[in-house]
Amino acid sequence: MKAEVKKFIQLKTNIPGPKATELLRKKEQNVPRGPFNTLSTFAVKGEGALLTDVDGNTFIDLAGAIGSLNVGHCPPKVVEAIKAQVDQYIHPCFHVMMYEPYIQLAEKLNEITPGTHHKKTFFLNSGAEAVENAIKIARKYTGRKAIISFERGFHGRTLLAMSLTSKVKPYKFGFGPFAPDTYKMPYPYYYRKPSGMTNEELDTEILRRLEDFFVSEVPAEEVAAIIMEPVQGEGGFIVPSKTFVQGVKQICEKYGILFIADEIQTGFGRTGKMFAIEHFDVVPDLITMSKSIGAGVPISAVTGRAEVMDAPNPGEIGGTYGGSPLGCVAALQVIDMLQQEQLVERANAIGQTVINRFRQLQEKYETVGDVRGLGAMVAVEFVKDSKTKAPNKELTAAILQECHQRGVIVMSAGIYSNVIRLLTPLVITDEQLTEALDVIEEVIHELA
């Protein structure tokens, strides 16, 4: 390969290079094939929106560890906080001897999450754990068992979270039986709505079907909670209307059902507000958080109405590593960065730049079917033609592969795997963003 050097992207080898190839050989011998990998190489350094691999290739990262790095790779304030914490103690376990960072972060999340009511927060390790515990709390509080999620939704890979998740392959196929008393309802997908139907009519129809569900399938009196991603992540960055989200919340209030906002991918500034649910003027009863909360340090949270969160008795929720001190101090710095460096506002500027570029491509190429997003949570959907809107998984995969070979890290999404999603670190510079988008545009021009 001829060495290619741009301002930020520096490519010295094909991907994978010789060192990465040797590590891949060891991976195949020692790691099961189940965990997927976007790139066939290995990182040695990350800074801001840039990643460098073992062969000296530097990439612009528009995946951000699947939305875990809104404040970028290795933000200095976070790194310093983690180092200082390591010198004090690493993990006494909150269930053995408590520590102040846990309380500080709980207090901060109670303050910044939507709603002025009294809230309480506790911590876990992963997004799936946050979802499972939010469901436990909802069931304990309501005394009900049934949980409703939505088609195309993603809530995790553990048993209950996987049961709430919609996409069959690769997440659910062969892993049943699934948790009982979980049900799925339609979620608006305006790009693929029936011909002749308006967005408003689609919202009305889906909300009607939700009401009908309580008559035909499960009585509302047995439903503990409805869990919703305010913007569907793995489902393809599907953005619902305010009418729909508020309609679901009104149904919850009508029947005494708890509304859970799953903000694991949408949270912490990604959509141009601290939490995506704020776009819809809805206050959830419970909210789950993870990914970007800790700048890459594993930590997750459930925040909710105090009376709901207090439903479990001592010992009924928790976990050995939940709310690790390292995650807590990292999260406190992340929140400070988002607020002090105006990164939430920055998300809107990034998103507008990306959407404008993709919509120009949409006008040129029939295969660029839909461009959508909220803030810096932006996606482009590829189809075979504009009339049938048949998903074009093959083209999407080819574009991803070529982008990776040219130094831009992007990922797919959608139940048909025909969506390219951007989860750009919010600290990306304008120059870095332009360079990355130029590469993506070049690839689409060549392949679409």
Image (cartoon, grey):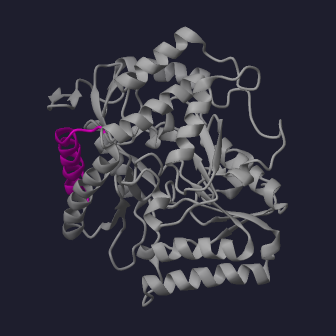
Q: Quadrant of residue 425?
A: top left
> 262 or 98, which lies in front?
98
> 186 or 54, which lies in front?
186
Question: In x, y percent, where is residue 118?
Answer: 63, 51
Question: In x, y percent, where is residue 300?
Answer: 59, 38
Q: Look at the image and say whether residue 142 sits in the magenta stretch.
A: no
Q: Look at the image and say whether residue 428 sits in the magenta stretch.
A: yes
Question: In x, y percent, where is residue 55?
Answer: 32, 19
Q: Main secondary structure of the magenta part?
A: helix
Which corner quadrant holds the N terminus?
top left
Relative side of 77 to 148, left or right: left
Q: Quadrant of residue 167?
A: bottom right
Which corner quadrant holds the C terminus?
bottom left
Relative side of 321 to 46, left or right: right
Seen in the picture, residue 167 relative to 12 is either above or below; the reply is below
Magenta part of the chain: 427-448
Question: In x, y percent, where is residue 182?
Answer: 75, 62
Name which residue lies at 56% across and 10% down.
88
> 383 or 435, which lies in front?
435
Name which residue lies at 30% across and 43% down.
342
Residue 151 in view of the camera: yes
Name which residue lies at 50% across and 21% down.
25
